[in-house]
Image: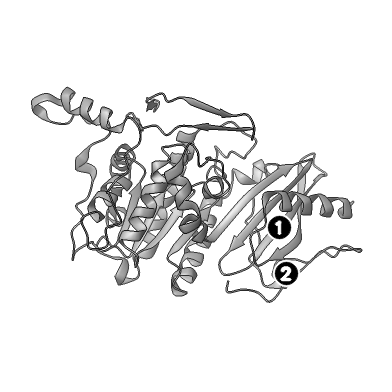
């Protein structure tokens, strides 16, 4: 049975002056089922110089990521490669006492159903893949005793996702983690000594849905419209709390903006816990996609919280103005910009080469990356 989004419809806000379309936050659920390098290294100028990542001691781009390499993408474990690189980067960040870690990558690449940015997909497909990816990441920390006995918290965006994951990933190595949600963690920490004010910020309509679920449940209790409460693991001080590591799965992205607000509350209430956000669309949050006039609480978190996250594994495709490329970083290395050069192969399939355009200590803007790719494309002809 296909899974559906059950949403409370909210007004659509069109920001004509900025060309931005934004939705007011909604409550939703799912039904069944550097260290710094001394300077940036330019690889093109008056005469183009093509240097490999390996020559500069940088992590090379993962294989099979190009939308023009579908036959390769479908036959290799791209997501497994992403996890391995992410684990190493998270370990390096934690060793340097980084407490706010960002992981960003295309979750649908690889396997028989591989999809690139040019293919049709929806938020549910992304959420399923991000959940699957993180469920397989969590056990990789269990070799260290400090992450055992529930000290790794799998934090899902809502109760239904937690319920599905608890059912689908029943193996002992997966159940070693603590299964919980943004709401459960925020409310739990609101009673602690570092509580950061007010508890959980509920999305518009969630209280209505919760009340309806209880009414429908009657004498049997909650009808479970928003998920099964029994799927939540208890959070017990001195046992699995405080957590050593939070893995927060796709907060806000495709769901209520309050997820991002509540993540800040969680972090402030447990400052010694490392928070790793997996595919949380933080570029949208930091880039002003949600105007402060409509989302004041979210806007207030941007400078004081979300801009302080350190990308540990970041891989983002660019396709604009006729050029293709990638922005890439593995902590603690600098940022890499790669031009994707597509040529006709002998067998009729496309051949893809990557040109390292530049490296830099600070993350470049979207426009800067496009400009660099355009310059490199002209130099490459």
Q: Can residue 91 be seen in this view?
A: yes
List the single residue furthest toward the bottom.
Answer: 38
Q: Is mark 1 on a helix, strand or loop?
A: strand
Task: Name the residue rendered at 8%, 26% in the picture.
Answer: 219
Foreground pick, 278 / 61 = 278
Residue 115 point in image, percent of width and height:
59, 38
Left or right of 74 on screen, residue 167: left
Q: Residue at x 73, y 53 (%)?
A: 368
> Within 10 angstroms of label 2, few (less than 14), some, or many (20 or more) residues?
some
Q: Mark 2 points at which residue?
A: 40
Please determine whether, in this image, residue 226 is positioned above or below residue 272.
above
- Dot 2 falls on a residue whose secondary structure is loop
User: In the image, is 302 to the left or to the right of 380?
Assistant: left
Q: Can residue 251 be seen in this view?
A: no
Specify whether 303 is left or right of 206. Answer: right
Kindly identify which numbered label has been placed on residue 337: 1
Residue 288, x across and y down, in percent = 56, 45
């Amino acid at each position: 049975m296909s899974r559906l989004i059950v949403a409370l419809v909210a007004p659509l806000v069109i920001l004509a002056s900025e060309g931005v379309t934004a939705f007011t936050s909604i409550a939703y659920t799912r039904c069944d089922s550097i260290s710094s390098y001394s300077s940036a290294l330019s690889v093109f100028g008056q005469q183009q110089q093509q240097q490999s990542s390996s020559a500069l001691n940088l992590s090379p781009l993962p294989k099979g990521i190009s939308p023009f390499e579908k036959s390769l993408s479908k036959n290799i474990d791209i997501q497994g490669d992403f996890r391995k690189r992410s684990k190493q980067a998270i370990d390096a960040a934690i060793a340097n006492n980084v407490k706010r870690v960002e992981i960003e990558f295309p979750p649908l690449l690889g396997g028989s159903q591989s999809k690139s940015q040019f293919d049709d997909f929806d938020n549910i497909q992304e959420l399923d893949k991000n959940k699957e990816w993180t469920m397989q990441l969590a056990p990789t920390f269990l070799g260290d005793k400090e992450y055992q006995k529930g000290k790794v918290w799998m934090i899902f965006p809502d109760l239904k996702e937690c319920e599905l994951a608890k059912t689908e990933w029943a193996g002992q190595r997966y159940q070693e983690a603590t299964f919980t949600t943004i709401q459960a963690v925020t409310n739990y920490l609101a009673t602690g000594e570092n509580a950061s004010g007010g508890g959980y910020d509920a999305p518009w309509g969630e209280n209505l849905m919760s009340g309806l679920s209880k009414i429908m449940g009657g004498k049997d209790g909650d009808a479970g419209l928003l998920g099964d409460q029994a799927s939540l693991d208890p959070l017990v001080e001195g046992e699995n709390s405080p957590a050593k590591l939070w893995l927060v799965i796709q907060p806000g992205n495709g769901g209520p903006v309050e997820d991002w607000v509540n993540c800040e509350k969680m972090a402030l209430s447990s400052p010694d816990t490392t928070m790793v956000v997996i595919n949380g669309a933080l570029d949208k949050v930091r880039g002003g996609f949600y105007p402060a006039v409509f989302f004041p609480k979210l806007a207030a978190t941007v400078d004081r919280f979300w801009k302080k996250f350190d990308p540990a594994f970041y891989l983002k495709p660019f396709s604009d103005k006729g050029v293709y490329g990638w922005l890439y970083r593995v902590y603690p290395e600098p940022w890499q910009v790669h031009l994707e050069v597509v040529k006709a192969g002998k067998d009729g399939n496309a051949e893809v080469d990557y040109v390292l355009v530049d490296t830099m200590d600070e993350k470049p803007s979207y426009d800067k990356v496009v400009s660099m790719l355009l310059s490199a494309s002209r130099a490459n002809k």
